[in-house]
Structure formats: structure tokens, C-alpha cells
Amino acid sequence: MNEACNYSDFGQTFFDWDANRHEFANIPYYLIFDHKFKTKYVFITQPPGEECPDWLTRANTLEELAQRPGINKEDLLQTVERFNFFAKEGKDPDFHGGESAYDRYFGDPEWKPNPCLGPIDTPPYYGIAVLPSALGTNGGLKTNENAQVLNWDEDVILGLYACGNTMASIYGNAYLGLGSTIGQALTFGYIAAKHILGEKS
């Protein structure tokens, strides 16, 4: 997948269902990178060049890294070879990484030709399994334009209001960027307060 996309879209890709194997096809993901990346960029909580923590797998070769449970050696080698070929050209025909302004904003502007793509070719290599977790920004109670909560019949429940993460997102399944839920909370909190006081929003 395109790891430069926003975390909401990132999370949704975990749940691609494989009907033949009756399981989620992408759980877990394996995040793979090389020493060049490790010494130049922040990885989760690790500053560039910091000693490798116990929870991060380190290997001198990709073949050695593929010994980790759940990783298929041939798939890993073929994927890295394909990725490297296109990364050197600055292209990502599979997931389109670095094509949008959103992607490039978080990339390395000094890295050419694509600020979001670099080949994985400098040992040692690192890998970690990535699993989905919960983040409550898209679920919640259905409301109307006054932030009043609606029941199953779409009728107003008198005296009950919702805003922020307790209300269903006005963006549906989409995610616009940092602050989306805060903006929604402030806006509909204000609307609810005005409605409670009997004022027009």
C-alpha cells in the first residue's frame, strides 16, 4: 500500500477480505526498510541512527529477514526487486506513492526523483509487523444539522445532543487531515449550545 497516505485510508486497507482463504489478506503488514532509511529518518519513536530497539527485527540480508514468521521469502525478494526498480525511476505503479501533494508534503524534498520513494538496497535491513488498532473518529451517534441525536426512525431525541467523536462523522468514511475531528467538535458544540439557548446558528 501507499504508506504516505493518511492513517484513516491506511487503516482501511487492513480489511481487504480474501474470500478463498476466509481471512483478511493484509493482516499483518510487514514494514521493511534499510539502513540508509534508519540513519536518516525518524521511525516511530526512534531518532535517526539510534541503536536498534529489541522490538525491531534486524538482518544482514533480505533472505535472513524473511526468516521471520509470516514472511514468504520469495514474495519478499520479488516485491523488493520490483519496488526498487520503480523507486529509482520515482514511480509507484502499484500504489501511486508520491503522486499527490498530500504524499509529497510528508516526503523528503531533497530526495529525487520522488520524495516518497527510495530503493531498499543498503544492509542491514529492518522489519516489523504492523497490525490494525482502534481509533474512534468515524463512528458515533447520528445527528441532524442542530447536533440533535436521532433515533432509528430519524426522529429527534429531545434534550440529547452530540458533537466530536460521539457523533457520526460528517465526512463519512473519508478523512480530510489533521484536526478534522477537532473542527467537527468545535463547530457542532457551538451549534448545539446555540440551539439549546434557542438562538439561530
Image (tube, rainbow, N blue to C red):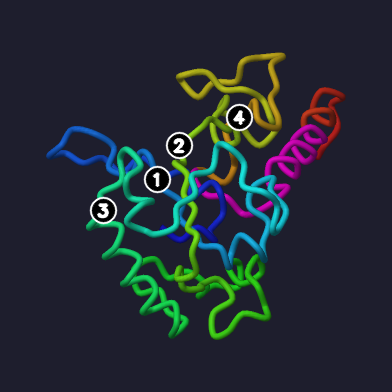
Q: Amino acid at mark 1?
A: Tyr
Q: Nearer the viewer, residue 24 or 65?
A: 65
Q: CA distance from mark 2 to mark 4?
A: 32 Å
* Camera-side mark, 4 or 3: 3
Instruction: Look at mark 1 in the image and give the residue it sits on.
Output: 29
Tell me which numbered mark, 1 or 2, is placed earlier along the sequence: 1
Q: Amino acid at mark 3?
A: Lys
Tell me which numbered mark, 3 or 1, is placed earlier along the sequence: 1
The magenta segment: 173-191
Q: CA distance from mark 4 to mark 1?
A: 36 Å
Who's the residue at 50% across and 75% down the image? 99
Q: Nearer the viewer, residue 3 or 158?
A: 3
Tell me which numbered mark, 2 or 4, is placed earlier along the sequence: 2
Q: Amino acid at mark 4?
A: Thr
The reply to whether callout 2 and callout 3 are in contact (CB within 8 Å) is no
Tell me which numbered mark, 4 or 3, is placed earlier along the sequence: 3
Secondary structure beneath dot 1 equals strand
The reply to whether callout 1 and callout 2 are in contact (CB within 8 Å) is yes
Secondary structure beneath dot 3 equals helix
Residue 54 quadrant: top right
Specify whether 195 is left or right of 43.
right
Tell me which numbered mark, 2 or 3, is placed earlier along the sequence: 3
Number of the label disc, if any, that sits on residue 143: 4
Instruction: Look at mark 2 in the image and give the residue it sits on.
Output: 131
Secondary structure beneath dot 2 equals loop
Secondary structure beneath dot 4 equals loop
Who's the residue at 53% across and 30% down the image? 134
